[in-house]
Image (cartoon, rainbow, N blue to C red):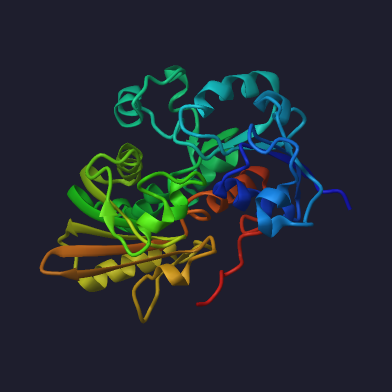
């Protein structure tokens, strides 16, 4: 039976692209029609993403984004930051496709913040603010009506969901001190001096302390959720994991431990992919290889310590993009995303 919707992936040669492709190939309502890339042109998808061997006859095509999007109901942009912004106008002008963008090019509303954190002037500042920020737990109804969604960054997703209950309750104000530990797959396919496995294995190191590019989108999102004058002091840490992010955030609070616990449970009670563990704290191994998030908080002496864990490639990337696509297309929000990952 033919599937109802058609999709394309543009920039599908990376780790995030592999997750998008894998889940779209098994989607009950969406057919993956083409994958565009300037790398591996003509190669079978399974020759590059080894887990896809014999799952599809599709090959990487060197075609323009507008060509890739033509006739599609939805396109996923898995292109690098600064490249996506150059390609979106032609897709919008020449096709009717919905867009889910996994880069950071349309997450922000402030052109000055984009220049500060991404190092260049935005080529289309007039388009900032036209994409819906794709965090379903905050913006589900806006995503449902959107043509264009900017899917959040991996650190941003993990930090925002860990603090969302406090922000929504008006209990998040002032300084937020956060340490986020991340796996190597977030650095992409091509190794560098700081991300190559022989250097990373058995090592812990910080990078971009107090200056990470996800900082402005986190602040924008927390303000939109109800935080008052938030000030994020974020230190990311590179860890010898392949997948996963673990975040610890420290904020002052006047609420009691029981009030905060109830707040977290109430906020996420009907969210299909956010869990509040009852007898333990969040762990990466519990969410790795899945679209699930674990969040929790402990309170003592006026300080709330908020914990959150995600898989950076799935809920922090491709999986969340598909979750937004499902909402946009009006299909089951959980389609292709309900697998629990492996244990251990």
Which is more toward the observer, 282 or 324? 282
Q: So how many labels did they put on this image?
A: 0
Which is more toward the observer, 33 or 206? 206
Q: Where is residue 324 in the image (x, y as percent from the top left)?
A: 57, 46
- Extreme left residue here? 301
Q: Where is residue 336 in the image (x, y as percent from the top left)?
A: 66, 59
Q: Quadrant of residue 26?
A: bottom right
User: Does residue 288 sit above or below 327 in this rendering?
Assistant: below
- Extreme right residue here? 1
Looking at the image, can residue 171 be seen? no
Taking the image as shown, residue 291 lies to the left or right of residue 31, namely: left
User: Does residue 234 sit above or below 97 in this rendering?
Assistant: below
**Residue at x 73%, y 53% (from the top left corner):** 25
**Residue at x 71%, y 35% (from the top left corner):** 41
Taking the image as shown, residue 116 lies to the left or right of residue 31, namely: left
User: Does residue 128 sit above or below 262 in this rendering?
Assistant: above
Q: Position of residue 32 (x, y in %)?
A: 74, 45
């Amino acid at each position: 039976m033919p599937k109802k919707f058609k999709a394309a992936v543009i920039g599908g040669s990376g780790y995030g692209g592999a997750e998008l492709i894998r889940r779209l190939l098994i989607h009950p309502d969406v057919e993956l029609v083409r994958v565009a890339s300037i790398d591996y042109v003509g190669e079978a998808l399974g020759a590059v993403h080894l887990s896809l061997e014999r799952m599809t006859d599709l090959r990487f095509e060197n075609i323009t984004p507008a060509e890739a999007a033509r006739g599609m109901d939805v396109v996923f942009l898995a292109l690098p930051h600064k490249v996506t912004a150059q390609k979106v106008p032609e897709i919008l002008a020449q096709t009717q496709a919905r867009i889910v963008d996994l880069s950071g090019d349309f997450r922000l509303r402030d052109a000055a913040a984009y220049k500060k954190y991404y190092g260049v002037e935005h080529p289309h500042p007039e388009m900032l603010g036209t994409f819906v920020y794709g965090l379903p737990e905050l913006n589900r109804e806006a995503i449902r009506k959107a043509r264009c969604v900017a899917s959040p960054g991996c650190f941003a997703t993990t930090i925002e969901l860990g603090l969302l209950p406090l922000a929504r309750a008006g209990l998040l104000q002032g300084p937020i001190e956060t340490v986020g530990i991340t796996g190597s797959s977030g650095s992409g396919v091509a190794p560098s001096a700081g991300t190559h496995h022989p250097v990373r294995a058995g090592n812990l190191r910080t990078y971009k302390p107090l200056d990470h590019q996800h900082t402005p989108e986190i602040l924008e999102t927390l303000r939109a959720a109800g935080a008052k004058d938030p000030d994020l002091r974020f230190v990311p840490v590179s860890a010898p994991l392949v997948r996963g992010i673990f975040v610890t955030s420290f904020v002052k609070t006047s609420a009691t431990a029981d009030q905060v616990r109830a707040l977290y449970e109430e906020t996420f009670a009907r969210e299909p992919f956010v869990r509040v563990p009852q007898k333990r704290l969040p762990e990466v191994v519990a969410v790795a290889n899945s679209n699930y998030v674990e969040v929790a908080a402990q309170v003592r002496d006026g300080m709330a310590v908020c914990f959150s864990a995600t898989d950076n490639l799935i809920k922090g990337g491709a999986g969340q993009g598909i979750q937004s696509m499902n909402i946009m297309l009006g299909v089951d929000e959980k389609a292709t995303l309900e697998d629990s990952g492996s244990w251990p």
